[in-house]
Image: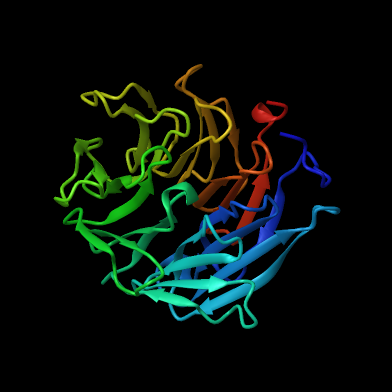
Amino acid sequence: MASPPFPQGSSPTIVSTDPGHGQAVKFSPFSGHRFACATGSDYGLSGAGYLFIMERNETTGKIAPILRMDYKDNFLDVCWSETEPNVFCGASGDGYIQVWNLGNKFPKVPIHEFKGHKREMSSVEWCLAKFGNTLLASSWDGTVCTYDMTSQWPLVKMPVSDVIVYQSVWSPHAPGNFITASADGVLQLWDLNVNNLKPQIYLSASDTELLTCDWAKYTPTLVITAGADSTIRGWDLRNYKSPIFQIDDHGHAVKKAKFSPYSPTTIASTGYDMSLRIFDYHISDINIEILNLHSEFVYGLDWNMHVRNEIATCAWDKTVQLTIPNCLKGL
């Protein structure tokens, strides 16, 4: 992939999300210069929410907000449509998911709402375009729902757990497959092509809360989990009696961990130790770089699909930071 056309310095690019404390950040799948950040008042615990759409000038590299949505409750996650460049959604603390279109005359007016959950939202994600246009959402009410734009109610509602489901992630390899991470330390694999609303795999991955999970981009059977025990574990879904690798490097709970879209063995993670860490599990079970970019808990993390090895993070310090870690430059 070619180098980005905008100027790059050695320091991260910092963008304010004041008055909101960062909860999630996502790059657009259509542009490496546009991203969204979900934030909330009172560290996402109560009060109003603010959802920012940011855009980077391709010539100067400067970033500025092009839209801000204010809502009565915190925004806890955000995602972009994989089929429409201007469509995105925000998931909030009242259990609602709202959808907007930047191309509309009144872009702050939602074009759709989903109402399938009874408690705070945890995560929301559109499936890859090659698999359709279905939204996957998880909640503190212990359920995971799928939606499409034909109705405000779920297509399928799955009672995943008796406790909080912190994240659900579509498989990038198999249509209708997704994994979930929940507060009871359990990872589950679900297949919507099987009509029984039961998990295909039920894996006790930790004795503490699982806060995040992700699917490898190059290996269909490889997933990772991480959470309150500060450990990232890799699992082969063909034989999951024990992890195939384990990384005990974070000092505190891991809030988010994601595989690189550019390297099959590289992982980025963030958490309550206020750091962004880069790992290559093929090389070592400790980090290859630590970036102390924030002064509060780092909740959001995403890889840029258009600018090679660029990572965005957001935190409770009311900033988004964009950086290419030194260990990944030129790779």
> What residue do we see at 24% from left, 64% from top?
141
**Of 299 and 106, which appears nearest the observer?**
106
Dividing the picture into quadrants, the one containing residue 226 is top left
Side of 290 where 149 appears, left or right: left
Q: Residue at x 60, y 41 (%)?
A: 292
- Percent x, y for residue 77? 45, 61
Relative horizontal placement of residue 239, taking residue 147 as reference (left or right)? left
Query: In the rendered image, which quarter contains the C terminus?
Result: top right
Color style of the picture: rainbow
Q: Where residue 79 sits in the image (x, y, percent)?
A: 50, 59
Residue in the image at 53% along x and 65% along y: 88
Q: Residue at x 68, y 50 (%)?
A: 32
Instruction: Name above or below for residue 60 compared with residue 214.
Output: below
How far across and down, in percent of the image, does residue 38 sit?
52, 64
Q: Is residue 75 left or right of residue 166?
A: right
Foreground of the two, 224 or 135:
135
Number of marks in picture: 0
Judge left or right: residue 308 versus residue 10.
left
Q: Residue furthest top?
A: 283
| Figure quadrant of the N terminus | top right
Q: Quarter of the image holding residue 158?
A: bottom left
Task: Relative to 170, say whether 329 is above or below.
Answer: above
Q: Is residue 68 above or below residue 309?
A: below
Quarter of the image where one finds residue 69 = bottom right
Work out whether 122 lies above or below 271: below
Q: Position of residue 185 (x, y in %)?
A: 24, 42
